[in-house]
Image (tube, rainbow, N blue to C red):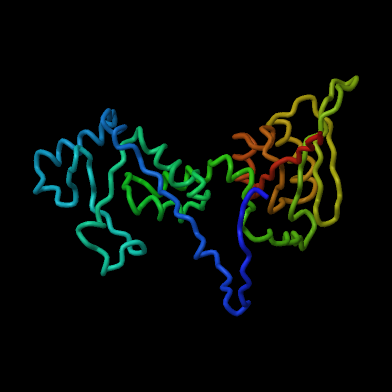
Amino acid sequence: MEYDFEIVYRKGSLHYVPDALSRAFECDEPEVNFFAFERIEDEWYMKKLSEVKKSPSKYTNWYIEDGMLYKRSYNALLDPVERRTQKNSWRLVVPAEQRERVLTESHCLTSSGHLGAKKTYDRLACEYWVPGMWYAVEEYCNSCDVCQRYKVPQTGPKGLMTRRVVDRPWAVVAADMMEFPRSKNQNKYLLVFQDLFTRWIEIVPLRKANGVNVLRAFEELVLFRWETPEFLLTDNGKEFDNAVVNTALEEYGVKTYFYAPRIIRPRT
């Protein structure tokens, strides 16, 4: 055998099963290379650094050490009252050219674990200060490629859709434009109106799909023939959503509701 060892019997009562905490390995926290701060191009950072140098008594919540700018910042969660000492209340101010790197180290490294925006912010706020840091962290986490690919959404299931209630004929009218090959009469479109109470349908062929033709057909087939509806339900095509139709419907007292058209995407 490769190893020379001796086996000694030990009672089971003397064995202690190690837990995860007793075997947890120490993980070195990533540190920003401060030497990269030597060449700073951030105008806001350099201006603030100059102001603090000139009038340190005026900026009591700012100070400079080894040529780097620090800001006093408290966090109710990270810094309880008993821990708000001179030592742990200072955060390193990160210039613009280093913020991407700091965000990456606080979110994307193996030791960071791709946590959510709140926990990434808490981790970052322990050491650093960035103007508008919460919004920067939130935007970074929401755009993280790994999180979008592999994280399971934590939101609850969508609720059931409520049924549309229509209590009388021609109260709610749905309209849609259908395109076909051009006919002998040079018509290419069919404009369809449907009463959602009776399911009655009115159809008119059109040569052009524009607001003028839609409004004329609506007046002749619905408004003057039946009655003024309360709601007109259409997709957001330009033939329905335009100044001509919107202005006339507003004068008639008809409210419009737009929905996204259904798009069938082929599966590969």
Q: From the viewer's side, name the closer residue of 66 and 140.
A: 66
Query: In this figure, what is the number of numbered marks?
Result: 0
Residue 230 image position (x, y, % from top left) = 69, 54
Q: What residue appears at the point 80 percent right and 29 percent down from the top-left corner?
A: 206
Residue 196 image position (x, y, % from top left) = 80, 53
Residue 99 image position (x, y, % from top left) = 37, 38
Question: Residue 183 vs residue 260: left or right?
Answer: right
Residue 268 image position (x, y, % from top left) = 81, 33
State which quadrant residue 38 falls in: top left
Q: What residue appears at the point 53 percent right and 41 percent down from the top-left corner?
A: 143
Which residue occupies the extreme right position in the image? 184
State which quadrant residue 52 falls in: top left
Question: Residue 251 vs residue 159: left or right?
Answer: left
Q: What residue appears at the point 62 percent right and 51 percent down from the top-left corner?
A: 3
| Position above or below: 242 against 208 | below
Q: From the viewer's side, name the closer residue of 101 and 47.
A: 101
Q: What residue appears at the point 53 percent right and 45 percent down from the top-left corner?
A: 142
| Position above or below: 110 against 244 | below
Q: From the viewer's side, name the closer residue of 97 and 178.
A: 97
